[in-house]
Image (cartoon, rainbow, N blue to C red):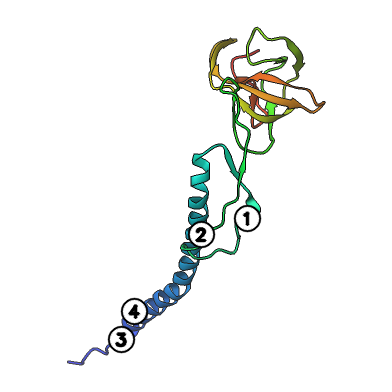
Amino acid sequence: MAKKKKSILPGLEIMIIIVFFISFMLFAIPRCNKKKMEYASTDAANTSTATVEENPSVSVDADSIPMSATTPNVTAPVVATPVPQASPTLPRTVTNTATRLYVTIDGLNIRNGPSLDSTILNKLALFEEVHFLNEITPFTEQISLGTSVADEPWIKVRTKRGGEGWVYGAGVYYYKRKYPGIN
C-alpha cells in the first residue's frame, strides 16, 4: 500500500493566519494607544474645568487651556472670571450655538412671553426658519393641538426678519415637517 503524501496546505493556512494576526496587532495597538492618550488628555482637561463648573459664578477662559496636552497627568491652567448671577425667576439657558428650527404648525403665534396670555407679536408660516436663542422654560404646558394634546416647554426664537419672541415647543422642530393631527 502506498503512503499518502502529506500536504503542506494546512500548515500554510495556519502560517498565513498567524502573520495576518501579528500584522493586525502591530497596526492596531499603536492606534489604540494614541486614542487612549487623546481621551486621557480630554479627561484631564474636563476634570480641571469641572471644579469651575461646580461654581457657576466663574467661567473658564478657553484660550488658557493648552491644546497640546497629551498625557493624563498634565494639569491645564484655569483662569476664573466672574460671571453675573441670573435671577432665579428667569428661564434656564441651554448652552449651544444658534440652532436652526422650522415651524411645524401653519400660523404659529410668536408671543411676547412664554404663556398663552402673552401678547401675540406675529404669526409664522409653515416651514418658516427660526433660530433657537438658547432659552427654554423650566416648565411645560399642555395645549390641545387639533386631535392631540402636546406637553412641551416654551422656546425663545428669532425670526429671519430679526423679531424675537416665544413659541410653543411643539410648534418648532429640527426638520421641515408638519405637526401630525393639525389640518
Q: Is 40 displayed left or right of 156 in the figure?
A: left
Q: N-terminal of the two: label 3 or label 4?
A: 3
Q: N-terminal of the two: label 4 or label 1?
A: 4
Spatial separation of the CA atoms under disc 2 and disc 4: 48 Å
Residue picked out by circle 4: 14
Spatial separation of the CA atoms under disc 2 and disc 1: 11 Å
Q: Is 85 displayed left or right of 159 in the figure?
A: left
Instruction: Give the structural element (helix, strand or loop) at label 1.
Output: helix
Q: Is 152 displayed left or right of 12 in the figure?
A: right
Spatial separation of the CA atoms under disc 2 and disc 3: 61 Å
Give the image location of residue 141, x and y in percent. Answer: 55, 14
Query: In the picture shown, does residue 167 fall above or below 135?
Result: above
Is mark 2 in CB contact (under 8 Å) with mark 3? Answer: no
Callout 2 environment at 10 Å: few (<14), some (14 to 19), or many (20+)? some
In the picture, the disc for residue 7 is 3
Query: In the picture shown, does residue 10 fall above or below 147?
Result: below
**Could you tell me the amino acid type at mark 3?**
Ser
Residue picked out by circle 1: 64
Instruction: Give the structural element (helix, strand or loop) at label 3.
Output: loop
Residue picked out by circle 2: 75
The residue nearer to you, when weighing 173 against 24, is 173
Q: N-terminal of the two: label 2 or label 3?
A: 3
Spatial separation of the CA atoms under disc 1 and disc 3: 67 Å
